[in-house]
Amino acid sequence: MTLNRTLRQLSNARDRRDPEIYDYSPDGDFDPPPGTRYMTLAEAQSLECNLCGQCCGSEEADLIGFPLRQYTFGGIPQHQWRSMNGGQPLIIPLTPSGVARAWRPADANNDRPPAFRCEALQHHPDGTTRCGLWQSRRPSPCDAFPVKPKYYPSHLERGAYILLNTQYQRLCTWVDVLVCPDDSVILKWRKRDGTLSRRLTAEQRKYVARVFREAYRDVFSKDGSLPLREWRKVRAEEGAWR
């Protein structure tokens, strides 16, 4: 699939008009975005990257003229992967306005990663991007994002749902995907495209919304994340539909 710049601008304009489609609130009640897809981990991992480049830098995912948000690349160590870029920093921290800045010790904090730019990202005339390091060594976060963190299988086996951290990457293949345990009843309530069937009862939709909110808090609200034992309590509600 190719994405041209016109499509990107249209999509960005849509997000600018309707910020609620990606700005979920970690507190209170809110419903999942209408287009949320519910998948097993194997299904999510079988999808192909569409080369939009939005995970490769805050500049790619944010709207023009808006302050850059923090993204999920993770902390940037002091060496900035110079060994992969001819001795020059590869991952560059950015100011909120998108200007490159010097590395700071706080940039190594995985809980509060800075906005960033990757020097290996290459733009092509058809609007897609390529990684200049893809056939060689890459920073470890590049291989893990968004569906291959090592802890995903064990957490799913123990009952957790996982919201992929692509909230702001609106052009990403994996945007608004909730990964479900293989035995989740939610997988039985979806259509062929992975979205929810319209035939769900009010109680079923209420349960899906609760699961989504808790998965959201696990990703975006560190202090509010659910221990795995609490996920088992949440999933106990599924017994009524088995």
Image (cartoon, rainbow, N blue to C red):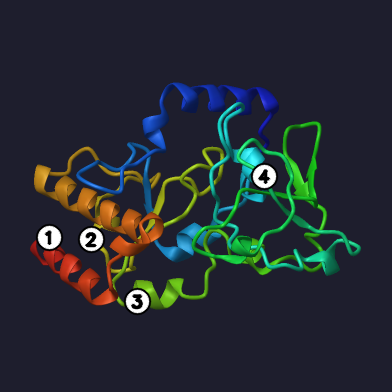
Residue type beneath disc 3: Glu
Query: Height in image: 107 above or below 229?
Result: above
Q: Residue 98 carries which label?
A: none
Q: How far apart are labels 1 and 4 at the CA level? A: 40 Å
Task: Indicate which disc, 1 or 3, sits on the residue closer to the N terminus.
Answer: 3
Residue appearing at x 32%, y 63% in the figure? 223
Query: Height in image: 233 above or below 208?
Result: below
State if disc 1 and disc 2 touch (CB < 8 Å).
yes
> In the depicted view, which residue is nearer to us: 48 or 76?
76
> What residue sits right under mark 1 in the picture?
241
Q: Residue 157 carries which label?
A: 3
Q: Nearer the viewer, mark 4 or mark 2?
A: 4
Q: Which of marks 2 and 3 is in front?
A: 3
Task: Indicate which disc, 3 or 4, sits on the residue closer to the N terminus.
Answer: 4
Q: How far apart are labels 2 and 1 at the CA level? A: 7 Å
Q: How far apart are labels 3 and 4 at the CA level? A: 31 Å
Query: Height in image: 170 above or below 215?
Result: above
Q: Is mark 1 on a helix, strand or loop?
A: helix
Task: Indicate which disc, 4 or 2, sits on the residue closer to the N terminus.
Answer: 4
Q: Is mark 3 on a helix, strand or loop?
A: helix
